[in-house]
Image (cartoon, grey):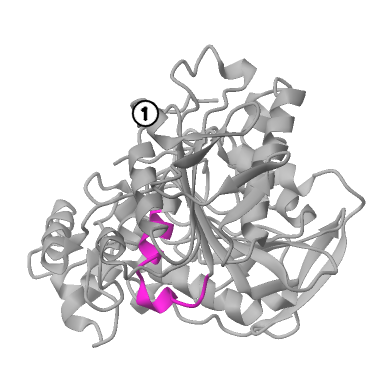
Amino acid sequence: MRYRLFLLASAMLAAAASAQSVGDTPRPARATIDSGILVGETRGGVNVFRGIPYAKPPLGELRWRAPQKPDKWSGERAALANEPPCPQPVNSDGTVNGGGVAGVQSEDCLYLSVYAPANVSKAPVVLWFYGGGAFLGAGHLGSYNGTANAREGVVTVAINYRLGALANFTHPALTRTAGPKDPLGNFALTDAVAALEWIKRNVAAFGGDPNNVTIAGQSAGGVMVMNLLSIPDARGLYHKAIVQSGALLTRGQTLAEAEERGVAAAASLGLPPDVTAAQLRSVSAQTFVAGEKTRRGVTSPIDGRFRTIATVDALNAGTEIDVPVMVGSNSGEPGFDNARTVAKLAGDSGAGAWLYRFDYVPGFRKDEWKSGAIHSAELMFTFDSIETSGWAVSAAGKADAADREVAKRVHSCWIAFYKMSAQAKSLTCGAGVNWPAFTEAGDDVMQFRATPQLVKSKTIPDGSPRSSPPRT
């Protein structure tokens, strides 16, 4: 299953745009966390901190290990610039890849950004996981700009997590040298748990409520959220979940299957059958990224340690982490049937589930998006980030007042979900629409068109075959 981000045309331009958002002249903003003092900036009532380490660099002996708490620093640490994204294939001509990234990457990449309302306490928190097929992307891109969230009273934490073979790789040599409790593969998911632990320890310093945390992601990031619904170490660290075009329902591979794939991947790099863990760790990150059979990594196994069950099996057994779930897809891609299944299973008892379908095509894309809103089309609307997303370049002023009004309405539904009680069974958003939790009997789904409306899910087809987003 391929995942691609949509219209993140220039990561560097988007980052610059986010720094130059409208508002007053930036002033220093400080926060004291368990690692030390951070100095970010405040502008227009929003505090922004960039490049915050949430784990030690996963280098050398820490490659293919669970992340460790970051070292403390002395004095004040500037948090004004984004650190390089995790290693991934990039284009040699300097244009962005399919995940919106160009230029320098680094294996030292476990950093996050925080967008927070100024002068608040106990604000809802969202932890965001980007898409990109689990081998592309970065957390700082303009579509994920959390300024609009902060202006509505929500703290956004966007992380980088390990990608490709540096995230999802299993090999007998690594298994033999792992400690009895060390995870075997699944390192992107261990990064996610480390970020949740960081939030529990530190988000209050930014005005956030560690007892109201939503995990959210799109595409491969949505798959991360799906997997976290059955990760024992994540239990209690989050309280709601959003899955955007990532409702993957697969059994998960066994450790033996993952090791077999890892052996084949290592062999493709010319490594011997008896390669050692030390030799594997000595291979450059760029080599793994460049290898045709290694760049995407080896799918996360059920290792019996960190990941004990596939989420689809936990949902069917009723043993998943029971939190409110919002799940959906776009009209110009497949996946709605899976989203409906997740909503049915997640909302069958206990916490509610909310089902949506994004079906809005802006006027200047109607000639291209013949089959509906393509994969990732919803991002700039759910974040209300038209001005800082890749569209800030590609739209060139073509996004109009109607597009911005739709963004405000869609964004209001995400904000309502972040703010609602975990015991809620309905929410109100989108200019006053009451959106009930999904049940088989009610069969309600929110359809996001020019005006949000409730329809019956059985009237909505699975979706069009996914097409690649246009280059912009």
User: Most extreme residue toward the front, as rendered?
Assistant: 441
Label 1 sits on residue: 461
Task: Note whether 447 is above or below 67 in the view shown.
Answer: above
Residue 90 as seen in the image, left or right of residue 48: left
Residue 409 as seen in the image, left or right of residue 23: left
Question: Where is residue 155 drawn, in percent x and y?
Answer: 69, 62
Can residue 142 be seen from the camera position used here?
no
Task: Note whether 70 is above or below 454 in the view shown.
Answer: below
Q: Look at 75% across and 56% down and name the residue there.
A: 150
Question: Where is residue 153 drawn, in percent x and y?
Answer: 76, 59
Figure quadrant of the C terminus: top right
Can residue 148 be seen from the camera position used here?
yes
- Residue 388 in the magenta stretch? The answer is no
User: Which residues fall within the magenta stretch?
Assistant: 223-238
Task: Note whether 191 is above or below 253 in the view shown.
Answer: below
Q: Look at 17% across and 55% down and name the residue there.
A: 265
